[in-house]
Image (spheres, rainbow, N blue to C red):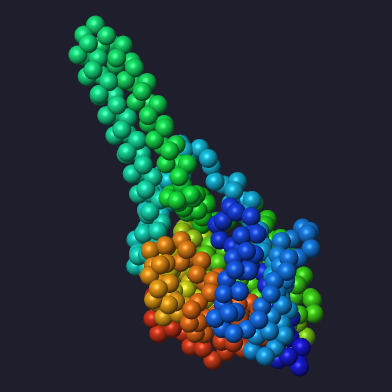
Amino acid sequence: MAADQADRAIRRRVFYIPGYDPFHPRRYRELYRKESAEQAEISGYSLTLKPRAKGQVYGWSVAAEIEGRSVETEVEVLVWSDLVLASMSNSIPATYLQLARTAWTYIGSGALWRLMRLRKGPVIAALYPVGMLALQLAMAILLAWGAYVGVSWAGVALGALALMAKALAGALAAALFVVVLRWFRERDNKLFAYYLMHDYAYGAQFNGANPPELEARLAQFADRIAAAMGHDVDEVLVVGHSSGAHLAVSVLADLIRAGRINIGPNRPALSFLSLGQVVPMVSFLPRAQRLRADLAYLSARDELTWVDVTAPGDGCAFALCDPVAVTGVGGPDQKWPLVFSAAFTQTLSPARWKTLRWRFFRLHFQYLCAFDAPRDYDYFRITAGPMTLAARYGDRAHSPSRITAPVNRYRDMAS
């Protein structure tokens, strides 16, 4: 960072890495537009968006007047939604096969029981698609069996037509079985069972190792961030949400390990904000040596500032769990991440909390939204305000209820 802006970020590049999301990245621009306007009105600052010129990358520009300073921010979404979409099978039998394989991965490795020792919320969220898909299958079987028995009994009553009735009953039962499962599948935009099943299956398909196509995409992400570090900006901020958090860990570890990020007075500040992270869902698996090594490495580096924000009200995240420490790879030189809570119950109004409390998936995105009474976490001040992450949270302590117990069984790391 320039010497005359030692703790202020007037020009910023933000790279946002989404979680497992098959949708076009424009949804994040529209979310930012809507929620930033609301937060600006609540908090009394000015913030406007405009789209970036069409090209190979997707993002938007932000012009803000916050804390008495003018700030210009370029936001870029690092897209992997095409990989997500390709991994989401539309086949019902394939999804049930994924269910069996994923359940075996977590149960057979013992990861499921260790994850439950951290937070039950995200484990229940992980078990939800298993239970929901099993329920759907059971209902399809019961309805099909009921149709078969009903038509067969009617055939017996007709005497000579009994054999024909049984054949008809079998055909009707099979058709009803398929119709019921398809009916549920078509309503998954409300049930999220298939979506979540694909999500957990993607991380578990190689027992915690990244698929080759994802590794190739992470290398592209690293190139984009490295290029930004050479620009005339004050801060390069990487934001990883949900499963995007552990992808960001690996990208940043790769950059620093390769010597592409240097310490010096004339480079931008490098900052990493992980939100609603679910790192243990992957780092607790047997073949996650790469991620475990990246966590251990990144946690001790001076080249960046890493802040991890979660909230106990988010049942889909490992709230206040230090992702390095609980994975069992935190060494004596660990300095990151700073872990604290967004405290939904205190920063959202009682009316808004009442509305959102049972909308678990919506709450998982609250980190990217407006708060009625923001305290020391405001997504829009962080991404469009004049202070770097280091300056903003330099004196911030960990939340007292931070969880650091190393409960992971697998602690070996890639060399």
User: Residue at the location (45% across, 80% down)?
Assistant: 347
Is residue 322 shown above or below 388? Answer: above
Is residue 28 shown above or below 70? Answer: above
Is residue 300 shown above or below 357? Answer: below
Quadrant including the N terminus:
bottom right
Q: Give the residue furthest to the top.
A: 160
Q: Nearer the viewer, residue 202 or 21?
A: 21
Q: Nearer the viewer, residue 102 or 146?
A: 146
Quarter assignment of residue 256: bottom right
Q: How many marks?
A: 0
Quadrant including the C terminus:
bottom right
Q: Position of residue 89 (x, y in %)?
A: 53, 42
Q: Position of residue 283 (x, y in %)?
A: 49, 63
Q: Give the residue furthest to the bottom.
A: 4
Can residue 348 be seen?
yes
User: Residue at the location (42% across, 41% down)?
Assistant: 184
